[in-house]
Image (tube, rainbow, N blue to C red):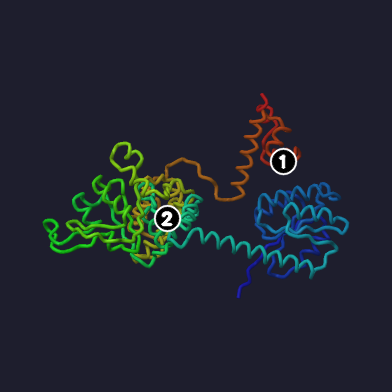
């Protein structure tokens, strides 16, 4: 069985201690040595170690601790999940406690004992691994939740939380959102999470059925009620008794039928077309529309009293382009399921295709994404899906956020500093207060991000 290699970064300027510590650990730990601030940060970026040991006394001030604390702060900024063990002398316990307060994981007092230090480092690796598994589990939960909603965006995760709260009640719910955003999926999620999940879920599109047939589809009809009514037919409301009825595109419901639906919501009884008997029905109503119902009310096309009956809770579903990162997550999930359903070999997107998916505005939302991927599965020749297979343009010059978290943090930090300098007209004291850092820290950041003195002077002018 192959043992997973673990990477430990030892930051120590004493050659003797470097050699001693390098041979303290088992063969499954790869030890990387760094002797100063610069080499330590280089190794941190290159090897991404899970655990770091740090001696606070580093050049150019090996007798002090300023460089060590500065490096500790930088490591915590660049790699906040890294477990940092402070190596300290017996007389430096105050510094160790201060380092723990800043975010270090643990400290170890010299002189070095191989068995004890190995135990402390092993424990740090175990904790780092457990925390990583927890993060992966939470990410998996976000991507693949119980309702079949594939997402990691805060907007959709908030909607999932809303579904969990609303579903157990029988409150009427109105789902708003543009065409193709997945409003029916939200409605089914409300049903799945409700006490009615064992009863029927029925859906009817009010815009897809002619006006003269919609009433019969909803309320049913008696035999002989009109020409062609050769037998009694139960409507959607009746057959969904004890369950959930989803009325899609409710904004297209004819005014006369709106009045009959309102009466049902008030009395919870129906009469079939051509009938006289009142039939009590227990059904939850969930509606959806891409239209602005309040505007339809002002135009006299939708009843205001019905609107308030249907919208006891409103769920507003964002368009796909408003869900940061979701287009890639959903595309990958769809590619796997569509390729499987069509019996093709497993396929993947190449980098060009992923870039195209991320840049596209998706005016047709998830529905458009489904269609593009179906096309791509059919059109692709090999294992990889290309942007051409998706019929998407890759000439968009929009600059995308980098994937590397260190780059993202560094870019955000640099922009915050420049913005603060502009706001404070280049005055260092004011800028440091605005940023919430000390002046020495700000000077270090200016040097780190190569924000030149000339730039600062220009800001003053």
Q: Which residue is mark 1?
A: 437
Q: Residues within 10 Å of mark 2 (few under 14, many from 20)?
A: many
Q: Nearer the viewer, residue 390 or 289?
A: 289
**Residue at x-position 31% and y-position 55%:** 267
Mark 1 or mark 2, whichever is nearer to me: 1
Residue 210 location (% of width, % of height) = 20, 50
- In the rendering, at what x and y percent does residue 145 appear? 47, 61
Label 2 sits on residue: 331
In three-dimensional space, the C-alpha distance between marks 1 and 2, rounded to whole angstroms, equals 42 Å
Tell me which numbered mark, 1 or 2, is placed earlier along the sequence.
2
Labels 1 and 2 touching (C-beta < 8 A): no
Res. 248 mark: none
Dot 1: within a 10 Å radius of its alpha carbon, few (fewer than 14), some, or many (20 or more) residues?
A: few
The local secondary structure at tag 2 comes to helix
- Left or right: 121, with 236 as reference point: right
Q: Is residue 422 above or below residue 332?
A: above
Q: Secondary structure at mark 1?
A: loop
Q: Nearer the viewer, residue 346 or 358?
A: 358
Up/down of 255 relative to 243, above or below: above
């Amino acid at each position: 069985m192959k043992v997973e290699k673990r990477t430990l970064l030892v930051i120590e300027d004493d050659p003797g201690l470097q050699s001693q510590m390098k041979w303290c650990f088992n063969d499954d730990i790869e030890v990387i040595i760094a002797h100063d601030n610069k080499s330590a940060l280089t190794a941190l970026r290159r090897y991404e170690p899970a655990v770091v040991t740090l001696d606070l006394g580093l050049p150019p001030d090996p007798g002090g601790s300023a460089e060590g604390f500065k490096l500790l702060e930088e490591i915590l900024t660049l790699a906040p999940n890294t477990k940092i063990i402070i190596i300290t002398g017996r007389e430096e316990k105050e510094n160790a406690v201060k380092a723990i307060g800043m975010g270090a994981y643990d400290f170890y007092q010299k002189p070095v004992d191989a068995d004890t230090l190995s135990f402390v480092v092993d424990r740090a690796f175990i904790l780092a691994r457990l925390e990583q598994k927890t993060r992966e589990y939470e990410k998996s939960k976000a991507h693949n939740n119980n309702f079949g909603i594939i997402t990691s965006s805060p907007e959709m995760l908030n909607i999932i939380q809303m579904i969990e709260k609303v579903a157990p009640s029988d409150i009427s719910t109105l789902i708003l959102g543009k065409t193709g955003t997945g409003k029916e999926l939200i409605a089914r999620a409300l049903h799945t999470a409700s006490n009615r999940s064992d009863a029927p879920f029925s859906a009817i599109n009010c815009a897809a059925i002619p006006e003269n047939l919609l009433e019969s589809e909803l309320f049913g009809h008696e035999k002989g009620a009109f020409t062609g009514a050769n037998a009694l037919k139960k409507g959607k409301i009746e057959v969904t008794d004890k369950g959930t009825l989803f009325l899609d595109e409710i904004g297209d419901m004819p005014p006369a039928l709106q009045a009959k639906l309102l009466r049902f919501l008030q009395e919870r009884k129906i009469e079939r077309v051509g009938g006289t008997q009142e039939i009590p029905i227990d059904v939850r109503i969930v509606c959806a529309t891409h239209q602005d119902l309040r505007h339809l009310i002002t135009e006299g096309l939708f009843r205001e009293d019905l609107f308030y009956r249907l919208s006891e809770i409103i769920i507003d579903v964002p368009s796909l382009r408003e869900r940061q990162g979701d287009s890639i997550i959903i595309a990958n999930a769809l590619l796997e399921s569509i390729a499987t359903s069509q019996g093709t070999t497993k396929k993947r997107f190449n980098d060009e295709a992923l870039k195209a998916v991320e840049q596209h505005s998706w005016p047709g939302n998830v529905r458009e994404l489904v269609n593009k991927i179906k096309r791509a599965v059919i059109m692709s020749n090999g294992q990889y899906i290309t942007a051409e297979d998706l019929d998407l343009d890759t000439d968009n010059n929009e600059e995308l956020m980098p994937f590397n978290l260190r780059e993202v943090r560094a870019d955000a930090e640099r922009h915050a500093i420049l913005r603060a300098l502009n706001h404070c007209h280049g005055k260092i004291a004011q800028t440091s207060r605005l940023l919430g850092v000390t002046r020495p820290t700000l000077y270090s950041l200016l040097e780190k991000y190569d924000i030149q003195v000339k730039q600062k002077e220009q800001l003053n002018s």
